[in-house]
Image (cartoon, grey):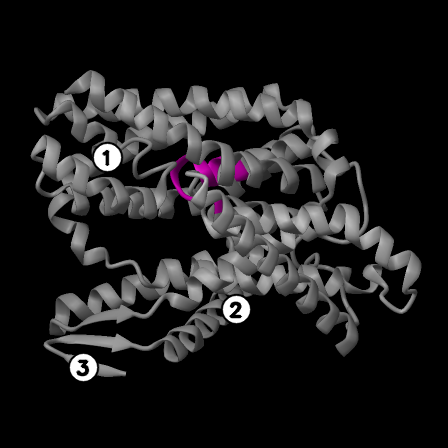
Amino acid sequence: MELIENTLALQSFFTVTLAILVLFIGKGLNLHFSVLRDFNIPEPVVGGLLFSILFAIVHFSIGISVEFDLKARDIMLVYFFTTIGLNSNVMDLVKGGKPLVILLAATIFYMIIQNAVGISIASLFGLEPVVGLLGGTVSLIGGHGTAIAWAPTFVEKYGIHNAMEMGIACATFGLILASLMGGPIASYLIKKHDLKPTESGAQDVGIAYDEKNTQIDYFAFLHAILSIHISIVIGFFLNESLEEAGLKLPLFVTCLFAGILISSFVKPTVSKKLQWLDWKAQKTAMALIADISLGIFLSMSLMSMQLWVIVDLAGPILAIITAQFVVAASITLFLIFKIMGRTYDAAVICSGFGGISLGSTATAMANMTAVTHRYGPSHLAFVIVPLVCAFFVDLVNVVLIQTLLNQLS
């Protein structure tokens, strides 16, 4: 921990420790204020937003900024998506084939609308039309990573000198709204249509709020950790091979696929030959590891937001984000729920879509986790949403952004 030129830099250990504290505070607030539970606001979102606001107050009052070492955050994301893969299998993908294609088509349609809205609002403010893309899929569905990656292109080729700041600001506002939107939408749909889960059993992430006396022995926990690490090793080499072939994907995507492969082909064989390797015993341990890793990741992401950076850009950005929020909420309520079947699974998928439409894949998963903890499991949602959000959308977004840049230049 160092204070250099009015900047307090927290190393990785302190950052993770604070993130755990933030997660506990978010859980405490959710337990104390029933409105947060009723609207299914994820616990790390509650704590993370509170601390990011506190850090902004410190910055404006005494001029000290807080910066975090976020290396551990990326590890938590890889852990989380690997557990999702290990909780799935090829048959799940076959089962989710039609819903996956429908959700992907709807998401691509929405991405086109999102860019059109961004370009239109930017034009109303007298800004260059390409600026609207920064308030479109570059920063919203794309998130902070895509905004940072594309910013140099906007600066060098289109002369948008504050492209980085605008992209980060839009992504930040979007992340906040996405974290707050998905849960309430799902809760509204579930209550309005009296929807019930069609499956029972363990959660994909964490345990239900009313589930007590959950027991995990050390062997089940170590078994889950070993499965995760083996999947990450395979996912790492798969990622390296794809990159050499010219296809660059986030590491968590290939680890997700590695987990699916192990769950589909290795797990059944091992369970038959080695009875002491009981894969069912690790189910709860795996779900809790998923819950912890997602919670810490999201806590770190939200508490580290530098809200003071985006104040100067608040006017046009707020206009763009407000319009995007209205469009995203409308499409989620009136299109996604309908085409996904008007079922409980569809409502959970809507909470995930609300997360990815303005935020990130992790936000989508956090929204779905909060909903399923309260109302019951939805394995279908946890299979198709991460595949659409984390894999296909990234590929489509690259093509869409480049195509629109060529047309607008």
Q: Is residue 87 above or below residue 95?
A: below
Residues marked 1 and 3 touching at CB (< 8 Å): no
Mark 2 → mark 3, Cα distance in angstroms: 30 Å
Q: Residues within 10 Å of mark 2 (few under 14, many from 20)?
A: some
Residue holding disc 3:
3
Check disc 1 and report its element: helix, strand or loop.
helix
Disc assigned to residue 28: 2
Check disc 3 and report its element: helix, strand or loop.
strand
Residue holding disc 1:
134
Start-end of magenta stretch: 352-361
Q: Main secondary structure of the magenta part?
A: helix
Q: Earlier in the sequence, mark 1 or mark 2?
A: 2
Residues marked 1 and 2 touching at CB (< 8 Å): no
Q: Measured from the top left, where is residue 146 in percent x and y?
A: 32, 42
Q: Measured from the top left, where is residue 15 in percent x and y?
A: 38, 74
The amino acid type, in three-letter code, at marker 1 is Leu
